[in-house]
Amino acid sequence: MSKANASPLFRWACLGLAAVMLVGCGGGSDDNGTSPPPSGGMFTVGGAVSGLGTGKTLTLQNSGTDDLALSANGNFVFDTRLDSGVAYAVTVKTQPIGQRCIVTQATGTATTNVSDVQVRCDNLAPATFTVGGSVSGLTGSMVLQNNLGDDLLVASNGGFTFLSALAAGSAYAVTVKSQPVGQSCTVRNGSGTVASANVGAVEVTCATLAAALPQGDWKQEACVLIGPGQWGRSLWRIAKQSETHATVSLGVATYTDANCAVPGQIIGGQASDGGDFKFDRTDATPTLSAFWGNWAQITGQTSRTVWARKGAYLCLLGDQTPTVFPTAASVESYVNAIIPNKICYTQN
């Protein structure tokens, strides 16, 4: 065989030998390159997760990189290996919804495979929200309740909030447990279901109750001399027949001193000579109640009158048709002016 004919065969033999040598030296792969080997150095970093809720996902990091998403409890290993002496620090990058996970034994230096990092997950307490609103028209104090409990004393107008917060989805029902003296308070937007925000739309509105028609002995504040060594105060003895009807007897309460402090006898007050009063309208402010009606006197004359109760006072006002006191506020304005003159009546 000549050299020219032998040369191609020699070249193919050399190529085959080289291929065999590459295989023998590890140049090939049993899985045809579908699973790359772990990157980095010699040692792995891992540990175990516990308490992770079903269907929840937790993402860990090592040294601020190498994200590892986990969706089940048990052992875990980061993909990146570390060289001997390299530090590691495992942290939580993303918490699972509704849970908080804490890492222990999270830091160290790799001198062998690390497998003792512990990640413990616990459920968070459900989010809670407050219930409240606003109060208007209040002149005293009252007690509100939510769901027949959580008593809240309210003594001023403005905002209020119950102390106990409620979880989303909980029902609330605001009611008035005790009414303020002389007032009636009503609740609007008082019930519903807590969503995902604080409730602040409850409205409590208070109004002054009209005082009852007066009855009994009412004495004018003014103390006047009525005879030698005798002073007196005009007396109206009111007999209430109904909530809109009263009769009056006129008299004088006598005293033995100029301050009308030492009482004497009552003169008169028995004959209903003060007339007959029938009321057809009432109105009130937060501090006064007024009664409009017809006054039939024993003389046969009839006129309009207004009785006004403000605190301890009963003021008796003459009126006309049409009225000169169209509202309780207008009555109160006049009453405020005459009370200092001691022409109104009290029951002391």
Image: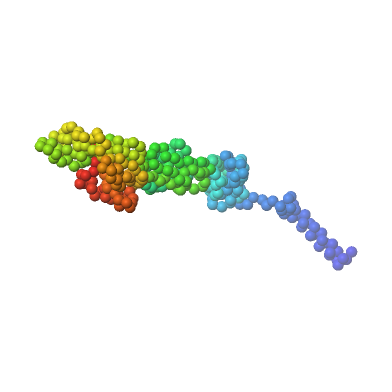
Q: Residue at x 17, y 32 (%)?
A: 264
Going by the image, does 14 lie left or right of 203?
A: right
Relative height, residue 297 to residue 40 (above, below):
above
Q: Quadrant of residue 154?
A: top left
Locate the N terminus by quadrant: bottom right
Depth order, front residue of 327/81: 327
Going by the image, does 38 lie left or right of 104?
A: right
Q: Residue at x 58, y 46 (%)?
A: 58
Locate the C terminus by quadrant: top left
Q: Quadrant of residue 250?
A: top left
Q: Residue furthest bottom?
A: 4
Q: Residue furthest top?
A: 265
- Which scheme is used to colour this image of the protein? rainbow
Q: Residue furthest front?
A: 300
**Residue 325: percent from the left, percent from the top?**
31, 51
Depth order, front residue of 183/133: 183
Depth order, front residue of 149/279: 279
**Residue 295: percent from the left, percent from the top?**
30, 44
- The reply to whether residue 222 is in sight is yes
Q: Quadrant of residue 112?
A: top right
- The reply to whether residue 141 is in sight is no
**Residue 48: percent from the left, percent from the top?**
59, 41
**Residue 330: percent from the left, percent from the top?**
30, 51
Q: Residue at x 17, y 40 (%)?
A: 223
Relative height, residue 12 to residue 304 (above, below):
below
